[in-house]
Amino acid sequence: MRKLKLEELGRVTTEEYEQIQKNPVVVVLDNIRSMHNVGAVFRTSDAFLIDKVYLCGITATPPHKEIQKTAIGAEKSVNWEHIPDANELIAQLKKEGYQIIAIEQAENSVRLNDYNVDTTQKYAIVMGNEVDGVQQSIINQCDTCLEIPQSGTKHSLNVSVCTGIILWKWYEAFL
């Protein structure tokens, strides 16, 4: 076994990436404090062909060197938009036919391993603040809350790690 060199990976250019069909999934980052988390979500969104990232509330926007540290250029390939009020965005996405999925520990949340992705549906995945999680006013608008089963002493995962796990499930469904 031999580690592949970068030129052997067959990666597309940013221009070629723009032409690739994206999965019908958008990520909503609401009030994310850490720019490293924002950058990591951009990088994951690039890898899993996410259609768009919405940056809401206090979530920082590119260009910024702290986002670029973890995005490593994905902030240039992934479509994004800053929307000040996540509640207004969620209402608009619902009107556009998106299933709104909050990633949160909530009453009647569905375990990720029990959730079936409908590949005929458009999805908006909502990730909340690192401390406070997804706002209750947004949960009130959601179709489903998903929860990643965990067994350790901590109550949650880092938001960028959590996003990666969630987006992999959607990417795998659309393969």
Image (cartoon, rainbow, N blue to C red):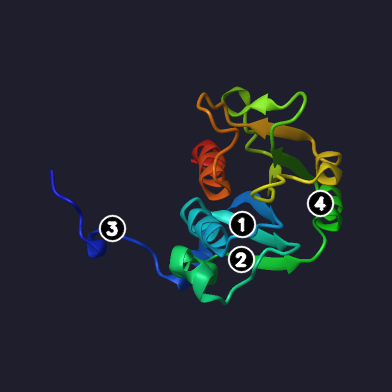
Disc 4 and disc 2 in contact, CB within 8 angstroms:
no
Tag of residue 9: 3
Tag of residue 79: 2
**For the residues marked 4 and 2, what is the alpha-carbon distance in whole angstroms?**
17 Å
Disc 1 residue crowd, few under 14, some 14–19, many 20+, Cα 10 Å:
some
**For the residues marked 3 and 2, what is the alpha-carbon distance in whole angstroms?**
23 Å
- Left or right of 140 in this view: 171: left
For marks 2 and 1 on the same chain, the one whose residue lies earlier in the sequence: 1
Compared with 64, 117 (above or below) is above
* Amino acid identity at mark 4: Ile
**For the residues marked 4 and 1, what is the alpha-carbon distance in whole angstroms?**
16 Å
Residue on which the image places disc 1: 51
Residue on which the image places disc 4: 90
Viewer-side residue, 20 vs 144: 144
Disc 4 residue crowd, few under 14, some 14–19, many 20+, Cα 10 Å:
many
* Dot in front, 4 or 1: 4
> Which residue is found at the position 50% from the left and 50% from the top?
48
For marks 3 and 2 on the same chain, the one whose residue lies earlier in the sequence: 3
Disc 2 and disc 1 in contact, CB within 8 angstroms:
yes
